Amino acid sequence: MSKKIIALVLAVIVAAIGFVFVACNGNEGTETTTAAGESQTEAAKESDLEYVKSKGKLVVGITDFAPMDYKEKGSDEWIGFDADLAKAFAKELGVEVEFVEIVWDNRIIDLNGKNIDCVWNGMTLTEDVKAAMETSKAYCNNAQVVIIPADKADSIKTVEDCKDLAFAVEKGSAGMEMAEENKFNFTEVAAQSDALSEVASGTSDAAIIDSLMAAAMVGEGTGFSKLTTTDIKLNSEEYGVGFRKGSDLAAKLDEFFAKSLADGSMEKLAETYGVQAALIK
């Protein structure tokens, strides 16, 4: 064999090896195809529904927020309208439920970091929430209301009466948005219950919280019996449940809500916690 032919053969071999090397390494970070014709990248992607089923647990992010999520004195069990709905939904999926108490302002970080699988805690469906999360359909009506000491009830009747008050509001909440919108003076706290404590202790003049929470926690026979809910409603809003953006669990929950409304179980549960009037049917 001549030297020219040998050189040509070697060149072909080197070129072939180079092609294989590029083919094997040049697709790093892109899709390759399995023998079954299925994209390996796509095959590796799990839906949120399958992710939750594979680990056997739905992790629910909550705060202490009666009547939606709370613990009775001396008990470690989370109960409430939202908590009990979450338990029923997890059962429908065939998994356990785990409740994780979160810092409300960090809920999106916790969700995207997979510390939790959903935010189910009387969450207002604001435009910001819907942009950051995959949300269920609305299931409860709500409003932001002004809470004051009962002995001040005669002097606080309108939004204008609130202009000189020092408010306590939960950081990142719809209540905080209302305080900002109305240009109220306010201090941020970690939870709505903390806002009530601020007013009860005299550190703040007033609080803005959810009307459903106010019905359960403020007034005669409650832990905040010296506080009262004014007739001042700063907005009207709706509650929904939030999942990771693009999650298929949101549509699954909508199916569960529809089924629970149809068989009456959701309304019965709402009656247990006194929120049946707020239920969206």
Image: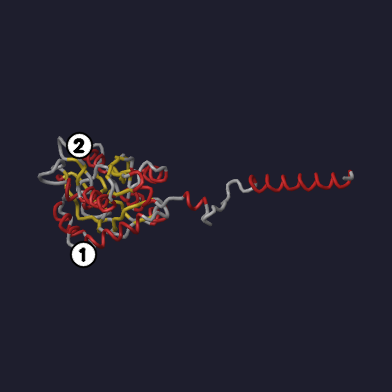
| The N terminus: image quadrant | top right
User: Camera-side residue: 274 or 36?
Assistant: 36
- Mark 1 in CB contact with mark 2 (< 8 angstroms): no
Is residue 115 visible in this depiction of the protein?
yes
Is residue 166 visible in this depiction of the protein?
no
Please give left or right for residue 183 compared with residue 153 in the image.
right
Numbered label tally: 2
Three-letter code for the amino acid on which mark 2 is drawn: Asp
Name the residue at 20% across, 46% down: 66
The residue where tag 2 is placed is: 76
- In which quarter of the view is residue 10 placed? top right
Name the residue at 52% across, 54% down: 39
Q: Position of residue 43 (x, y in %)?
A: 48, 52
Please give left or right for residue 195 compared with residue 29 in the image.
left
Give the secondary structure at mark 2: loop
Give the colour scheme of this rendering.
secondary structure
Q: Earlier in the sequence, mark 1 or mark 2?
A: 2
Q: CA distance from mark 1 to mark 2?
A: 32 Å
Three-letter code for the amino acid on which mark 1 is drawn: Ala
Q: Position of residue 280 (x, y in %)?
A: 24, 62
Please give left or right for residue 210 compared with residue 216 in the image.
right
Q: Position of residue 166 (x, y in %)?
A: 29, 43
User: Camera-side residue: 30 or 243?
Assistant: 30
The 10 Å Cα crowd at callout 1, few under 14, some 14 to 19, many 20 or more, is few
**Residue reaching furthest front?**
1
The mark closer to the camera, 1 or 2, is: 1
The residue where tag 1 is placed is: 262
